[in-house]
Amino acid sequence: MWLINKTSEFEFLFLGLSEIPNAQLPLFMIFLLIYTLTLIGNLLILLLICTDSHLHTPMYFFLSNLACVDVFYSSVTSPRMLYDFFSSNKTISLSNCITQFFFFFSFICIELYLLAAMSYDRYIAICQPLHYIQIMHPKFCAKMVSAAWTIGFLTSMIHTICTKRLAFCGPNTIYGFFCDLPQLFLLSCTNTFINVLVMFVVGTFMGSGALGITFVPYIHIFRTVMGIQTRKGKLKTFSTCTSHLMVVFIFYGTLIFTYLRPTPSSSASDDRLVSIVYTVLTPLLNPLIYSLRNKDLKEALRRTLQKILKVNKK
């Protein structure tokens, strides 16, 4: 499909997850359930952390921000995807497409640095437990979170400004359900060398920073854990990190496949599958992983339910 040769009037057409008519309703129900559970899970974590004084610690402060980001992160793409399952008009203007990408990529970057801050928190808790309170004081934690949000929006702004220089005058079909850089590069009738270069340079610079802060602390954590004499002590200490590591590997794996390939992929099925993982499933998995493996959150939920039952009895 071809549109007017004017970038300012250009619109993109989402193909969505499937072009099969009979698949629209089942897919809608599945992803509506996933989005609903994502909101409930993350908002429940936010509620528990905000209302339960036992969870007013640095680790849960970072986790509450992560839950907040996941709510915004999933809400950038999922509502539009659900709408398009039954919409006859699946187009989006260039300006709205760039706006969607800006917020989507911002929350990706914020999540990367929040995961890095959580790694540092685990490093101090395990490797320097006697200095934990002095180092991870509220002001320092607030600065780390503020830095994560600031870096996220600034990084996304760089890519957004570079994307605005692109012209679009040819094919307008996006093989997916949201606006993302690799797809826009494929559709642009401008040379995208500078954009790809900026994506790699900024991604390598900012990503290596987040990657280093995330994984270097675990080198020291592993050394500390291996120095513990008993097997039970090793497992107990390292168990405080397993949820975080699971989230990190899932998130980084899909992002590296999407953004750090030499050239954007034209394989629609591969891109759709990967995009589902990091746009839809990751925000759902985060609260599930942290809640199912976290005794403190389970206890906080139990205390909250007991309070609600007592109020209802009165």
Image: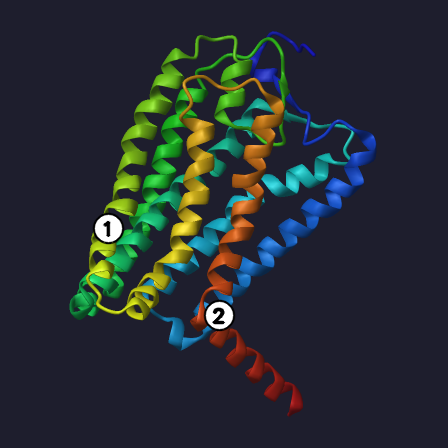
Q: Is residue 82 visible to us here?
A: yes
Please state which of the two labelled residues, at mark 1 or mark 2, is closer to the viewer: 1
Residue contact between numbered discs 1 and 2, judged by CB atoms under 8 Å? no
**Residue at image x 55%, y 26%?**
95
Q: Is residue 124 left or right of residue 19?
A: left
Q: Amino acid at mark 2?
A: Leu
Q: Residues within 10 Å of mark 2 (few under 14, many from 20)?
A: many
Q: Which residue is mark 2?
A: 48
Q: Is residue 106 visible to us here?
A: no
Front-lying residue, 223 or 59: 223
Q: Residues within 10 Å of mark 1 (few under 14, many from 20)?
A: some
**Residue at image x 34%, y 68%?**
236
Most extreme residue toward the bottom, as rendered?
314
Residue 119 image point, x, y percent:
30, 53
Front-lying residue, 191 or 119: 119
Residue 59 image point, x, y percent:
34, 63
Q: Which residue is mark 1?
A: 217
Marked residue nearer the N-terminal end (1 or 2):
2
